[in-house]
Image: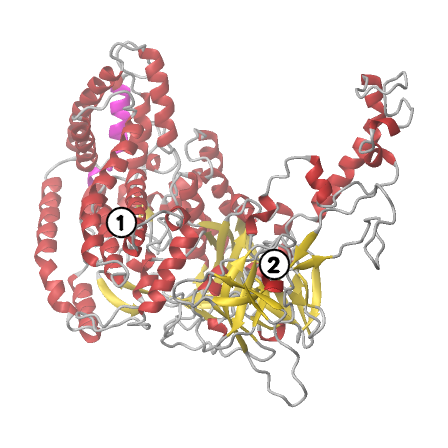
Amino acid sequence: MVAEGKTQYYFIRLPRSMPNIPVPAYLKDGTVKRNHKKSGRDPETGHISIRHKGGGHPQTFRIVDFVRAPVSQENEEPKPIRDKVLHIGYDPCRSGRIALVAGDGSTKMKIISAPHEMKVGDVVTASRGKPQSIARLKPGDAYPLAHLPIGTLVYNVELQPGNGAQLVRAAGTCAQILNKTETTARLRLPSKQEKDIPLDCLATLGRVSNIDHKNRVIGKAGRNRWLNRKPKGQTGINRTLWKKKRTFPQSTHFLGQDGGSSSSMSLKSVRHFLPLFRTSLLWACRASTTTMTTLETLNFDNLALHSLPIDSETQNVIRQVKDACFSLVEPTSVNNPTLVAYSQEALSLLDLPPSEVKRPGFVQYMSGNKILPGSQTAAHCYCGHQQGYFSGQLGDGAAMYLGEIINSNGERWEIQLKGSGLTPFSNHRDGRKALRSSIREFLCSEAMYHLGIPTTRAGCCVTSDTLIERDKDYTGNVLKEKASLVLRIAPTFLRFGSFEIFKPPDPVTGYQGPSAGRADILHQLVSYTIKTFFPQISTGDFQSPEEHYLAFFKELTLLTAGLVASWQCVGFCHGVLNTDNMSIVGITIDYGPFGFLDYYDPNYMSQASDARRRNSFKNQPELCKWNLLTLAEAIQDVLPLHKSRTLLEDLFDSEFQRCYMAKMKLKLGLLKKELPTDEKLITALFDTMEKTGADFTNTFRCLSDLTPKGCPSSKSDEDIIEYLVSQCVPLQGLIKAYSTVLEWSQMIAMCREVWKSSPNVISHIEKEADKHLLEDKRRRDKIEQLKESTQKGKEDNDRVLWTQWIRAYKARLDLECDQLDAEEVNKERVKVMKANNPRFILRNYIAQRAIEAAENGDFSLVQTILKRLKTPYRDDVEFYQTTLYEAASTYSSSSCNNEKTGLFNSPDTRKTNLDKLPDDAFNMRLS
């Protein structure tokens, strides 16, 4: 410490990049806090005037600058004040942290309230004017409310310009800008109250630091008293139970029946408290009702918009969005929105009760006609490799970011409206979605969740009287359909393609990312992703940034491998596994031309226009691995490609195989022993299913009826084999399935279109031509072989193949029971198999039945099917027979010729007439 005149100075130790500077003692040590309120001291002198009343500990506090920027004089241009953070410290009189700052380029110092995540060396700006760029605002900056976007989180809010911050100053708190008028901004305060503040009042961006302050341990009643928390009531139980024992009233209402001073109460005396307890409970229930989350009180956070760059251009026109991750846009309204269906389980993630769905305003918010208070709508910019080739900027062409909500459990959920209208990424489309595709996404999102597969959720589906034009069969016959929307919910909708906006010109297609060369934004995006969605990595101890990023890539590789293994085990085919459809947190996103396997065909494609069969069912693991490699190339500026590629090669295949085999063993009930022959047994099962055309879902489900040696059985092996044979595609159906290939005229037309847009791609297509020609030859040979057979011959051959495999499977089950209680082992096996092999899946014709009913104004079937999808592993034959019997017979052609492969699992169900089936009956997929 040194002295300079009459002012004492202290030197504080700063980072090496900054010199040590003297700090006035009043800033470092604080000044004496005179707190005479309720202390028994004279308010003028501080002398004790009333004995035994106490006055608390002597305290010092630091003088904080809550004004930040003075009010400008008339005709004077407001000047920004930039301060550099020198030190962040603790003030015993404040719950939040404080920051010592100095004017940029000067030595004049002051203390300000530190926002969450402020660091030494940061530069913060305060001004009464307009910020230079909304996209560059950061926590700690202070500006008038008039210049801050709706949805922004703020603290240290003024009530009158120039009077200094008076609201939202406690640790971890923040307010949110809900909306604005010509003169005021409405803020939701930490108390959930809403208050109108003049637009020219200053507010600081972010939230107050020390957010864990609310989680401190009180430990004892005395600490509550130190915090000045004590009973306020003057009468009744609240006051009486807190008073000293000797001051209790001598009444049997509060003490024992004898009126003595015993601290215990008799059962009879407790009865006197019951009316009070009932009253307290009533008020508690009323309080909980009034504080229940509503559409207007959703706890929006919108962290992505505060952490990532936003496009400075606000005009909603189709363009290349450069140097930004989001573009601020608003949804386009629709006429007469109507609720089709909703998932209460998904909405509960946002803390929304069922009563909110029944409100008239619900569909107005969920159709984009009204903006949720606290929401900030935007479209996300991303690129993508489509069909293996870089396609440049894609982005949210029909979806819109509504914001991020923190629920009561502290979970972060991003919400989107799909089908909400034009954005800068709409690419000459209308930004709308039809009712059929919206219902399919709504149902499949919830179906996948209840199957136990990581996925986005669907809160509701809304349709309208607004008409859009669609050629749903791609025949040139354009029809008018109703514009519809889906509320999508996920931790984040960031995807692999989000990191491709920085890609330089592609040598094959010539396209480049709109933010090519902006490595600074790439660092910002990767750091935000890790910190927000991989906190265990963010807080890990790593020797270098590269190790930090490599740990993130490793975790994503594990998540993606496990995800695609789950798809393969339920027979789910995504249909469009491009990099723009792969989630950065390892969940299933973007349900387009998806499909579930009916009969087992490893070459099954849910997207009929996939000429190269790139997105076939069997290719999904390899495609996911390829997409991860593409992501590694996209982030090589922060993580060297050789490191990420080596990790991918070493890790993905082994992790996929581990997850896949673990799930398959559960599906087959192989629980007790690990045998090297298990993989061969599983391979033989799929080989038999492919040769016989067996139904994927029903085959696995019925295997739980098999019993090993020494266990009682209600069904014989012959009964099960006959059932399996009955679940196989008939001969003509199998021939039609193998015959579904693209017409050469279609192929030539597609190649011409590719040649016009990207001539360099043709040479790459030629490299794959030989492989596809060989595959076509194999299919044609199979067709010729099947044509030489008969239906009876096929059934006899199917029976032989299934008998052989069942014999091998039973022998393996017998080994499970070796030296164990066979019946107990079998009970456990059956239970596990039924919990891992669904009885009910979203087959295409089931979805189509709901779509056609909804198009005719009947939405009840959508909600009914949703209810059944919530329990996919439960046996519920009555539901099938009473609710969807007609659907099974009417739409069996869109999944298989056999009704049993749809909703019915009983062997005596009648078969449909093959002569009435269309040529594409066994490959019909709804896009």
The main secondary structure of the magenta stretch is: helix
- Give the quadrant of residue 197: bottom right
| Farthest-out residue, bottom | 75
Q: Is disc 2 placed on a helix, strand or loop?
A: loop
Q: Which residue is mark 2?
A: 29
Percent position of residue 539, x then y: 40, 48
Give, as a three-letter code, the residue at label 2: Asp
Boundaries of the magenta span: 718-732
Q: Which residue is mark 1?
A: 923
Q: Is residue 46 left or right of residue 329?
A: right
Crowd tier of the residue under label 2, counting other residues whose Cα lies within 10 Å: few below 14, some 14–19, many 20 or above:
some
| Vertical placement of residue 290 versus 6, above or below | above
- Does residue 708 show up? yes
Which comes sooner in the sequence, label 2 or label 1?
A: 2
- Give the quadrant of residue 888: top left
Q: Residue at x 38, y 77 (%)?
A: 319
